[in-house]
Amino acid sequence: MANKIGIFFGSDTGNTRRVAKSIAKKLGDAADAPVDVKKASPDDLLKYDALILGTPTLGEGELPGLSAGCSDASWEEFLPKLKGKDLSGKTVALFGLGDQEAYGHEFVDALILLYNFVVEAGAKVVGFWPTDGYSFEKSNSIVDDKFVGLVIDQENQSDETEERIDAWLAEVKPALLG
Ligand SMILES: Cc1cc2nc3c(=O)[nH]c(=O)nc-3n(C[C@H](O)[C@H](O)[C@H](O)COP(=O)(O)O)c2cc1C
């Protein structure tokens, strides 16, 4: 697919879906409509060379899916289907939703699970994000002092969401479009 960006997300209560939609709207013609991974096949994702993948953290620092208590399948069920596929040559940007007040001891921990998966499959990840402006005890999703993707907290900092998306997209859009 000629350089369009594919956006895939998992979501339990809709926050991640809404952020994915906002990202798509801001990207305009550069991106296709966001797809919930519960409805996606690996081939749907593999046709893109540039990807934005989003996830909330649920359960005990887990990806969304049945074992995290979601009513539907999600990333937890989708990633095993993608396992063994080659993502080399693909550029991936990640975003994660979490709640730094209620879950400050495992803030956005699921983001690192997506990161490790795509890196192991050979993808290049862009769009690391500073930890400044968030208040939390611990997060597994930090590499080289930065979050491995954009972090959004709709519970405590929803007023910052659009600005954060804009700043992040200014960096990742050129990197994704090559
Ligand atoms: C049962 C449950 C467990 C959660 N666990 C975490 C967690 O471990 N770390 C975190 O940062 N946020 C956690 N959250 C907060 C969610 O990530 C946050 O509410 C997010 O916006 C939900 O996104 P969604 O509406 O797309 O499902 C949890 C929320 C719920 C309901």
Image (cartoon, rainbow, N blue to C red):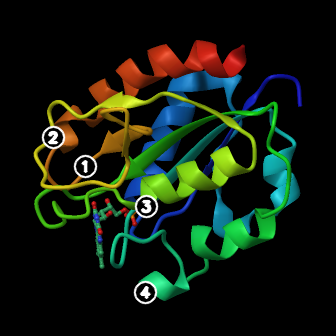
Query: Image quadrant of residue 41?
Result: bottom right
> Amino acid under label 4?
Gly
- Residue drawn at x 26%, y 57% is 107
14, above or below 128, in the image: below
Q: Secondary structure at mark 4?
A: loop
- Label 2, residues with CA under 10 Å away: few <14, some 14-19, many ≥20: some
Q: Quick check: is the Cβ at mark 4 less than 8 Å away from ligand 1? A: yes
Frontmost of labels 2 and 1 is 2
- Label 1, residues with CA under 10 Å away: few <14, some 14-19, many ≥20: many
Q: CA distance from mark 3 to mark 2?
A: 17 Å
99, above or below 78, in the image: above
Q: Secondary structure at mark 1?
A: loop
> Amino acid under label 3?
Ala
Q: Secondary structure at mark 2?
A: loop
Q: Earlier in the sequence, mark 2 or mark 1?
A: 2
- Residue drawn at x 44%, y 82% is 68
41, above or below 125, in the image: below
Residue carrying label 3: 110
Q: Secondary structure at mark 3?
A: helix
> On the rendered image, what quadrant is the N terminus found in?
top right
Residue 69, disc? 4
| Residue extending furthest toward the front | 144
Q: CA distance from mark 4 to mark 1?
A: 20 Å
- Label 3, residues with CA under 10 Å away: few <14, some 14-19, many ≥20: many
Q: CA distance from mark 2 to mark 4?
A: 26 Å
Q: Earlier in the sequence, mark 3 or mark 1?
A: 3
CB within 8 Å, label 2 to label 1: yes
Q: Nearer the viewer, residue 6 or 101?
A: 101
Residue carrying label 1: 153
Q: CA distance from mark 3 to mark 4?
A: 14 Å
Q: Quick check: is the Cβ at mark 3 less than 8 Å away from ligand 1? A: yes
> Amino acid under label 1?
Asp
